[in-house]
Every structure is written in C-alpha cells, then in structure tokens.
C-alpha cells in the first residue's frame, strides 16, 4: 500500500507521508547563512559532475539542428511579416 493510501486509511488526508511533519516538508532551511551557501556550492559541484561532454559528431548534429531550426523560424517570421505588411498596406495605404 502506498504511503498516501495508508495516510488516507489512517485519516490523514494531507498526502504527507507518515512520520514526516508538514513543517519539515516545505519549510525553508533557516540555518546559518554560510552553511546554506556551502550546501549550495556542494550541490552545484555535484550537478556539474553529472554533465557529459558531447562527442564531436553529436556536437555537429546539435549545431546543425539549431541552425536549421533558426532558418525555419526566420522563414516563418518573414512570411508572416510580409502578409501583415501587405495587409496593413492595403488597409491603411
């Protein structure tokens, strides 16, 4: 049985797992500012260690996709701009 279902059976409809208070669930850490900064730096370093550098062929694929996408969006904006420009020229010109 899931924790939320067991909480509902016990009469706790808050959805919080039993054994954990609601205050510790969403409350910000009000500890020392330097401890919070150190924790943040440790978390940033841990996330940066997960980053994988793409291979040369993958990088070329990514660049190609971005360039093609930008060209397609530019063409779309050009067409929409021409239509709006022609329409306003006919309406007001």
Image (cartoon, rainbow, N blue to C red):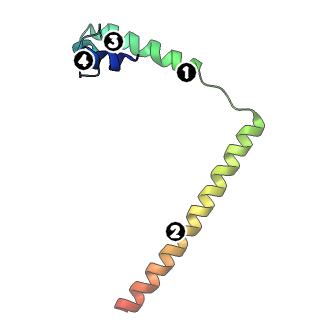
Specify few, some or many for label 2: CA neighbours under 10 Å numbering under 14, 14-19, or 20 or more: few
Q: Disc 1 vs disc 4: which is toward the camera?
A: 4
Residue indicated by mark 1: 48
Q: Position of residue 18 (x, y in %)?
A: 30, 11
Q: Upstream in the sequence, badge 3 or badge 1? A: 3
Q: Position of residue 30 (x, y in %)?
A: 23, 12
| Secondary structure type for disc 1 | helix
Cα separation between marks 1 and 2: 37 Å
Cα separation between marks 3 and 2: 46 Å
- Residue 32 lies, with reference to residue 91, above or below; the image says above
- Residue 53 lies, with reference to residue 82, above or below; the image says above
Q: Residue at x 44, y 79 (%)?
A: 84
Residue indicated by mark 2: 77
- Between 26 and 85, the one lying in front of the other is 26
Q: Upstream in the sequence, badge 4 or badge 2? A: 4
Residue indicated by mark 4: 27
- Residue 49 lies, with reference to residue 72, above or below; the image says above
Q: Upstream in the sequence, badge 3 or badge 2? A: 3
Residue indicated by mark 3: 36
Residues tagged 4 and 3 counted as in contact (Cβ below 8 A)? no
Q: Position of residue 9 (x, y in %)?
A: 28, 17
Specify few, some or many for label 3: CA neighbours under 10 Å numbering under 14, 14-19, or 20 or more: few
Q: Disc 4 vs disc 3: which is toward the camera?
A: 4
58 relative position to 3: left or right: right
């Amino acid at each position: 049985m899931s924790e939320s279902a067991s909480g509902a059976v016990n009469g706790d409809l808050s959805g919080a797992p039993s054994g954990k208070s609601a205050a510790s669930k969403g409350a910000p850490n009000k500890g020392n500012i330097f401890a919070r900064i150190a924790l943040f730096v440790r978390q940033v370093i841990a996330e940066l260690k997960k980053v994988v550098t793409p291979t040369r062929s993958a990088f070329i694929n990514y660049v190609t996709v971005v360039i093609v996408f930008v060209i397609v969006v530019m063409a779309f904006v050009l067409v929409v701009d021409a239509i709006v420009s022609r329409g306003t020229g006919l309406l007001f010109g």
